[in-house]
């Protein structure tokens, strides 16, 4: 015959299991486990990048065009504007990935890979133009494939709306079919003004112009792709209905929202009953509980050791790879920057 305390434990342990089974099978639970709307991913590419480092003469660098009038480097202006575009799109619940977020050289292939691996809805590469003399000015949008012409036109219209009043002429759109040929989503390159033109170079250096430009790029994306504002509306509706687990663009893409079975109060009841059962088991069988804790502790130690060993091996492997790829990148990127490289 069983001890009454054992029977009590059996009851205590089986109740939460039954409740969990009923809840998981119920339609309400299935409705609640429906995934939250995933933020749209857009990849923004700040053109050029990387600085000369006398200590590492082989380090790749690519400043882009440099304004003769104020010394502004294209790589710095493209990064500043890209960060403004990122901030604006994040206000519209977009998960923005920058191909670089600091001053570093990157190949076209690396930038393309960032766009494709993130399955971006659209890809925008930001550059500034340059010409051997200071005469030419204006904003231009380049597109790599015939299918991108609509995106290019929308972007050009938006840029003209914002930059026209600031005195930047509209140079329209132009096909450039040898650049960004491998991106798998609508793609444009913007050339909003000329660094070689003294008046436009001083505009590019000003925060007001950079902000107007960033707003025009956001407007170009959103007028071309209605998904952006549709997804924003879905996320806003979800967040209003689920204040306890809102969709936050930057984190939801990296880690999906956890599956939470059961409604609020039932989850609390299950948790409390389980805790009670565990406590009763520890009181009833202290030796077994102590042995279990010791075994779990040993297992945790072994796991941590295993992870540390694997990480050390990974670091050694990555270091060896980095040495090889740095010399490859140096061959590809350390070259004189071609003036007006965006067109010829
Ligand atoms: Zn450029």
Image: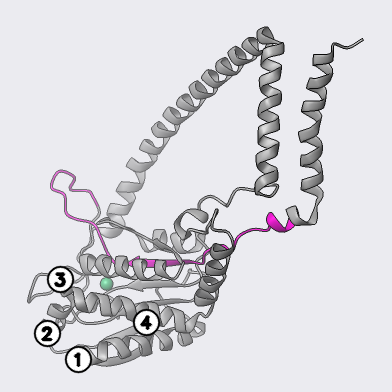
Q: Can you tell which of label 1 and label 4 is closer to the viewer?
A: 1
Where ligand 1 lies, by quadrant?
bottom left
Q: Can you tell which of label 4 and label 2 is closer to the viewer?
A: 2
Residue 128 painted magenta: no
Element at label 2: helix
Q: Determine which residue is flagged by label 1.
A: 167
Q: Earlier in the sequence, mark 1 or mark 2?
A: 1
Q: Position of residue 297 (x, y in %)?
A: 55, 17
Q: Position of residue 82 (x, y in %)?
A: 31, 68
Q: Are marks 1 and 2 in contact (CB under 8 Å)?
A: yes
Q: Earlier in the sequence, mark 1 or mark 3?
A: 3
Q: Determine which residue is flagged by label 3.
A: 66
Element at label 1: loop
Q: Which mark is residue 142?
A: 4
Gap between marks 3 and 4, in whole Å? 20 Å
Q: Which mark is residue 199?
A: 2
Q: Can you tell which of label 1 and label 3 is closer to the viewer?
A: 1
**Quarter-of-image position of residue 6:** top right
- Magenta stretch: give its range: 30-59
Element at label 3: loop
Q: Residue furthest front?
A: 4
Q: Residue furthest right?
A: 1
Apparent side of residue 280 relative to residue 324 in the rendered image (left or right): right
């Amino acid at each position: 015959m069983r001890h009454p305390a054992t029977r009590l434990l059996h009851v205590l342990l089986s109740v939460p299991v039954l409740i969990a089974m009923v809840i998981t099978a119920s339609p309400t639970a299935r409705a609640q486990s429906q995934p939250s709307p995933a933020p749209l991913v857009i990849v923004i590419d700040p053109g050029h990048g990387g600085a000369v480092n006398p200590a590492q003469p082989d380090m790749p660098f690519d400043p882009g065009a440099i304004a003769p009038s104020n010394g502004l480097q294209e790589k710095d202006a493209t990064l500043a504007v890209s960060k403004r575009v990122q901030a604006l799109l994040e206000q519209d619940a977009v998960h923005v990935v920058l191909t670089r977020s600091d001053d570093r050289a990157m190949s076209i292939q690396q930038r393309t890979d960032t766009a494709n691996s993130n399955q971006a809805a659209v890809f925008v590469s930001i550059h500034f133009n340059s010409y051997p003399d200071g005469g030419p000015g204006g904003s231009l949008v380049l597109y790599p494939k015939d299918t991108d012409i609509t995106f290019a036109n929308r972007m050009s219209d938006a840029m003209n709306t914002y930059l026209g009043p600031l005195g930047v002429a509209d140079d329209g759109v132009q096909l450039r079919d040898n650049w960004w040929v491998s991106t798998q989503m609508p793609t444009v390159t913007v050339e909003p003004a000329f660094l070689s033109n003294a008046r436009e170079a001083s505009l590019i250096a000003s925060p007001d112009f950079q902000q107007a430009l960033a707003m025009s790029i956001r407007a170009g994306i959103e007028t071309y792709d209605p998904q952006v504002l549709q997804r924003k509306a879905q996320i806003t509706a979800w967040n209003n209905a689920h204040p306890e687990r809102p969709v936050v663009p930057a984190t939801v893409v990296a880690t999906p929202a956890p599956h939470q079975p059961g409604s609020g109060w039932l989850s609390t009841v299950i948790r409390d009953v389980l805790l009670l059962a565990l406590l009763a088991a520890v009181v009833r069988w202290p030796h077994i509980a102590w042995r279990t804790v010791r075994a779990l502790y040993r297992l945790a130690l072994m796991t941590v050791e295993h992870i540390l060993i694997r990480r050390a091996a990974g670091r050694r492997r990555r270091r060896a790879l980095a040495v090889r790829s740095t010399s490859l990148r140096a061959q590809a990127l350390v070259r004189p920057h071609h003036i007006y490289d965006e067109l010829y």
